[in-house]
């Protein structure tokens, strides 16, 4: 996704539509039966926020009362361009989220193959996802993990 000045409005709108669609057949008037909706947006070259943090989790929240409205909708943004702020971290010091962000940003960059392979060797979840990605996009996926 390449955000423009109104992208944050589109993100909120599409999350509301998703939440509504997930519960469209619910004839119960009990709101307690509603399930949470999580929508994850990966931003590639432009950033949604001005800070250095690559991961944001948005909810309806009253900051004065320090309380969420209901906690049903979750908007998660991952701004891959901001991984430059964690790129020099040692893999052993990275959180799982850091490793995922670096993998998503650099997995197709041949110059960063050695670092990606080190991430794959320490994170089984990313390794499984990588093999699946390579099978879907290139063939057998073995060249990634060898």
Image (tube, rainbow, N blue to C red):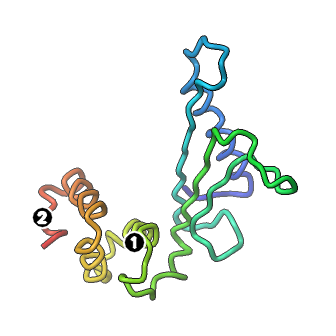
Kindly give the residue lying farthest to the right in the view shown.
64
- Quarter the C terminus occupies: bottom left
Where is residue 70 shown, x and y percent of the image? 70, 39
Where is residue 106 shown, x and y percent of the image? 38, 73
Q: Which mark is residue 142?
A: 2
From the viewer's side, name the closer residue of 115 and 64: 64
- Identify the secondary structure beneath mark 1: helix
> Which mark is in front, 1 or 2?
1
From the viewer's side, name the closer residue of 93 and 134: 93
From the viewer's side, name the closer residue of 95 and 50: 95
**Image height check: is 88 above or below 80?**
below
**Corner quadrant of residue 73:** top right
Q: Residue at x 44, y 73 (%)?
A: 95
- Identify the secondary structure beneath mark 2: helix
Q: Which residue is mark 1?
A: 99
The reply, left or right, for residue 90 in relation to residue 140 is right
Q: Are marks 1 and 2 in contact (CB under 8 Å)?
A: no
From the viewer's side, name the closer residue of 40 and 91: 91
Where is residue 11 shown, x and y percent of the image? 65, 47
- Quarter the N terminus occupies: bottom right
Q: Residue at x 61, y 13 (%)?
A: 28
């Amino acid at each position: 996704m390449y955000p423009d000045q109104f992208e944050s409005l589109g993100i909120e709108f599409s999350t509301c539509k998703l939440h509504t669609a997930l519960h469209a057949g619910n004839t119960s008037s009990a709101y307690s039966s509603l399930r949470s909706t999580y929508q994850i947006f990966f931003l590639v070259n432009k950033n949604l926020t001005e800070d250095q943090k690559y991961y944001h989790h948005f909810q309806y929240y009253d900051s004065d009362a320090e309380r969420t409205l209901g906690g049903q909708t979750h908007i998660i943004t991952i701004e891959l361009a901001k991984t430059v702020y964690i790129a020099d971290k040692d893999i052993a010091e990275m959180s799982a989220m850091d490793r995922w962000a670096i993998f998503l940003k650099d997995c197709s960059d041949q110059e960063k193959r050695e670092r990606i392979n080190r991430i794959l060797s320490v994170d089984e979840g990313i390794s499984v996802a990588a093999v699946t990605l390579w099978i879907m996009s290139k063939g057998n996926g073995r060249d990634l993990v060898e």
